[in-house]
Image (cartoon, rainbow, N blue to C red):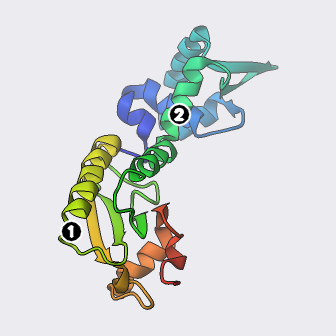
């Protein structure tokens, strides 16, 4: 899945570009601004906005000879478009909810990399740090099965392959035994699904 342009990925063409521009903007936009943000001509933007207006998906305010438009977030279809534009946030919540079924529960489960930054493209992996709880080995059948099931489900939820980094609690406490650059990326970009925030994982 393309999480940078999620609206355009599923609604191709000029209409998807215009809807994406509107969904990512909270305030009113002029026709020219819509065209610029959507990377289409003003004529194309005007035609699409006219259709969307008839469908009730946008609100339009005429000021003299100018018109300002915005996505109508009280409209049911407009709400779906906005949800699609913020798909990354909703997917993270689904991943967090699914992670409650992992048993034994991870000491920490952290998404990092391009997906955590909201920059994942269809070619991107979903990078996940899974920290095993104390006393759980890498070959523990319950852990392997449960974490593997979550990773499979996460791949279906996101539409992207999941890349697991499975480490022991002793590998991160008190000092991480991971590559320095990798650990910095986890601390900087990481989003916790289970357990403490990335910068607090090393604390007892």
Q: Which of 105 and 173 is in front in this view?
A: 105
Q: How many neighbours does mark 1 have within 10 angstroms: few (below 14), some (14-19), or many (20 or more)?
A: few
Q: Quadrant for residue 145, please give it.
A: bottom left
Q: Residue lying farthest bottom?
A: 175
The residue pinned by badge 2 equals: 83
- Image position of 26 with respect to 31: above or below: below
Regarding mark 1 in the picture, which secondary structure is present there?
Answer: loop
Residue 89 location, x and y as percent?
51, 47
Residue 13 location, x and y as percent?
38, 27
Residue 88 location, x and y as percent?
47, 46
| Mark 2 vs mark 1: in front | 1
Report the residue at 28% width, 58% height from top. Answer: 147
Q: How many neighbours does mark 2 have within 10 angstroms: few (below 14), some (14-19), or many (20 or more)?
A: some
- Image position of 187 with respect to 25: above or below: below
The residue pinned by badge 1 equals: 140
Residue 133 location, x and y as percent?
37, 73
Report the residue at 45% width, 51% height from top. Answer: 96
């Amino acid at each position: 899945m393309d999480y940078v342009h999620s609206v355009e990925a599923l609604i191709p063409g000029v209409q998807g570009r215009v809807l994406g521009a509107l969904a990512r903007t909270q305030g009113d936009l002029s026709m020219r601004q819509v065209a610029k943000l959507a990377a289409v001509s003003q004529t194309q933007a005007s035609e699409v906005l006219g259709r969307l207006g008839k469908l009730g998906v946008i609100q339009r305010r005429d000021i003299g000879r100018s018109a300002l438009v915005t996505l109508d977030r009280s409209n049911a279809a407009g709400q779906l478009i906005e949800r699609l534009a913020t798909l990354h946030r909703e997917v993270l919540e689904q991943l967090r909810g699914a992670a409650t079924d992992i048993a034994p529960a991870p000491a920490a489960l952290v998404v990092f990399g391009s997906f955590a930054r909201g920059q994942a493209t269809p070619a991107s992996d979903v990078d996940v740090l899974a920290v095993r709880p104390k006393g759980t080995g890498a070959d523990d059948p319950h852990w392997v099965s449960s974490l593997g099931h979550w990773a499979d489900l996460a791949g279906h939820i996101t539409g992207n392959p999941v890349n697991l980094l499975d480490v022991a609690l002793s590998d991160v406490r008190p000092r991480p035994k991971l590559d320095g650059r990798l650990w910095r990326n986890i601390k900087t970009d990481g989003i916790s699904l289970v357990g403490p925030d990335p910068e607090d994982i090393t604390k007892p």
